[in-house]
Image (spheres, grey):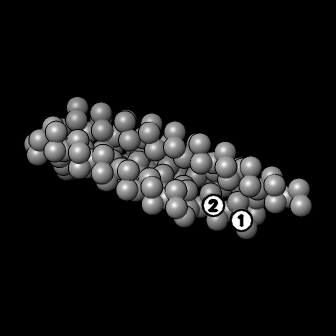
């Protein structure tokens, strides 16, 4: 659970710093650009950790299904942010892309540890 809080804290602190440096005019775009990838990464992390503890053999199937759900979520999310909330595309897309790459890179590193723990448990 600790990595989850580090992802959230790191995202919020980096958003606050970027908003302070770049100014309030891009703050909403930076916030919404961070929020979508953060929600998806937190959800993925919770489901992955729970599944690895309960059913390690089913983890791949859950991750594949999760990828389809996230693809749909991101498509709907981006359309709502740009069309409904009418956010400025450039700062939103830059923020979204940076947070998406950073959070999923962190998650990939953390998943290595989850997989290693699952393999160690199954070897016992």
Q: Residue at x 37, y 56 (%)?
A: 9
Q: CA distance from mark 1 to mark 2?
A: 6 Å
Q: Is residue 3 above or below residue 92?
A: below
Q: Residue at x 52, y 39 (%)?
A: 105
- On the image, the x and y values in percent for residue 106 come to 51, 43
Density class for disc 1 (Cα within 10 Å; few <14, some 14-19, many ≥20) is some
Density class for disc 2 (Cα within 10 Å; few <14, some 14-19, many ≥20) is some
SS for dot 2:
helix
Q: Which residue is mark 1?
A: 53
Tell me the number on the disc at residue 70: none
Instruction: Say which quarter of the image contains residue 86.
Output: top left
Q: In the shown orientation, is residue 6 left or right of residue 80?
A: right
Does the CB distance between marks 1 and 2 fall below 8 Å?
yes
- On the image, the x and y values in percent for residue 14 come to 30, 46
Q: In the shown orientation, is residue 41 left or right of residue 52?
A: left
Q: Residue at x 59, y 42 (%)?
A: 109
- On the image, the x and y values in percent for residue 76 come to 37, 49
Q: Is residue 7 above or below residue 109?
A: below
Q: Residue at x 85, y 58 (%)?
A: 122
Q: Is residue 109 above or below residue 39?
A: above
Q: Which residue is mark 2?
A: 49
- On the image, the x and y values in percent for residue 56 come to 76, 58
SS for dot 1:
helix
The residue positioned farthest toward the bottom in the image shown: 54
Q: Quadrant of the N terminus?
A: bottom right
User: Can the viewer see residue 62?
Assistant: yes
User: Can the viewer see residue 83?
Assistant: no
Q: Quadrant of the C terminus?
A: bottom right
Closest to the observer, 64 or 8: 8
């Amino acid at each position: 659970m600790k990595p989850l809080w580090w992802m959230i804290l790191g995202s919020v602190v980096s958003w606050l710093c970027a908003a302070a440096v770049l100014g309030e005019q891009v703050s909403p775009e930076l916030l919404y650009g961070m929020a979508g990838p953060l929600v998806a990464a937190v959800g993925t992390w919770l489901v992955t950790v729970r599944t690895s503890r309960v059913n390690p053999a089913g983890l791949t199937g859950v991750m594949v299904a999760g990828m389809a759900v996230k693809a749909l979520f991101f498509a709907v999310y981006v359309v709502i942010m740009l069309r409904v909330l009418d956010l400025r595309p450039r700062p939103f897309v830059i923020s979204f892309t940076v947070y998406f790459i950073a959070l999923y890179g962190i998650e990939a590193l953390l998943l290595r540890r989850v997989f290693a723990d699952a393999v160690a448990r199954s070897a016992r």
